[in-house]
Image (cartoon, rainbow, N blue to C red):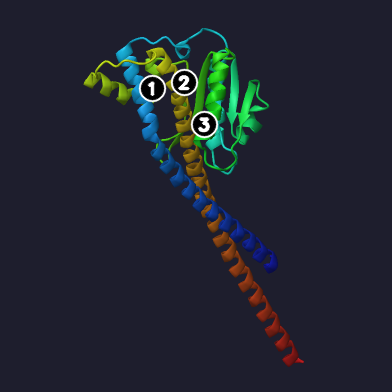
Amino acid sequence: MANLRDIRTRMKLISQTLKVTKAMNLISTAKLRKGRRLLADTEPYFNRIQRTMANLLHSAGKVESPYFAEKKGGRTCVIAVTSDKGLAGGYNANIFRYVSGVCKTVSNPVLILIGNIGQRYFVNSPYMVLENFSFGSRIITLDDASVIAEYIVSQFEWGVFNEVRIVYTHMQNTLTLVPAERVVLPFNEERMRSAGSDSVFLEIEKKKPAQLDYIPSPEAVFNSLAPQYIKGLIYGCLIEAYASEQSARMSAMEEASKNARDILDKQQLFYNHTRQASITQEVTEIVSGTAALMDN
């Protein structure tokens, strides 16, 4: 017969685990709301930058800029956005598979990793890791995105790589999280449309705004806005990945809490049956002993 003390110990451990998973679920829910709110607060600024760049390209025509330079061959930089902590279900595994697939289709891939989990995984991969950024469990800030954007732009200008792609997790809704990919550099109008500016281009083409004079030149204005545009694009991807991570962890902890409650219920039922059997056995022994004494 099972030891009642051992069963109580298991039930106590399961209850403690349930408390942890429920707490992590609540924390992830709060972080998810904060990430969405932060992204919504910063969207107007970056939308204005997109609008200005779209207006400039539409009114000034073709703009000569190193950010449009497309070269064949060379290295392709793949930015992989993962988490700094685990317990997020298949969040990181999906990114690993997607990045590995991207690296097989591009020429001479090099990796820039964001998150400790990605660094642990890709350190053993055949692809060269150029840099790794880690921000802990805190929410991404504009300064963080600025550091990454400045590093990417400087490496692109120096010719270390000819193309930059970012792979992150896109949250269609709280239950549907899918890996997504964007081409950060080099620029062209089609890619800028795919990066979220399509509605801006269509609006400008429809309204046909007046021709503007850009001082000192359209190229200079465009080149000064381009790093801000890249920073906004990266920041948006990082915040969406952060919100997706919290959503994945929230779902994982909710499922873990459900499993813990199911196991706890089974252990409680097993404990009740064992305790009842123990009591029945003790009563039987007492009755048998009493009967033996009376016979004597």
Quick one: 164 or 275, which is closer to the camera?
Answer: 164
Q: Position of residue 85 (x, y in %)?
A: 60, 41
Disc nearer the start of the sequence (3/2): 3
Mark 3 and mark 2 residues within 8 Å of each other at the beta carbon: no
Q: Is residue 81 above or below residue 245?
A: above
Residue 187 image-quadrant placement: top left
Outermost residue on the right side: it is 296
Mark 2 and mark 1 residues within 8 Å of each other at the beta carbon: yes
Q: Position of residue 224 (x, y in %)?
A: 45, 20
Residue denoted by label 2: 183
Disc 1 residue crowd, few under 14, some 14–19, many 20+, Cα 10 Å: few
Residue at x 33% of width, y 23% of height: 198
Residue 263 seen:
no
**What type is the residue that disc 3 sits on?**
Ala
Q: Nearer the viewer, mark 1 or mark 3?
A: 3
Gap in angstroms between the C-alphas marked 3 and 2: 16 Å
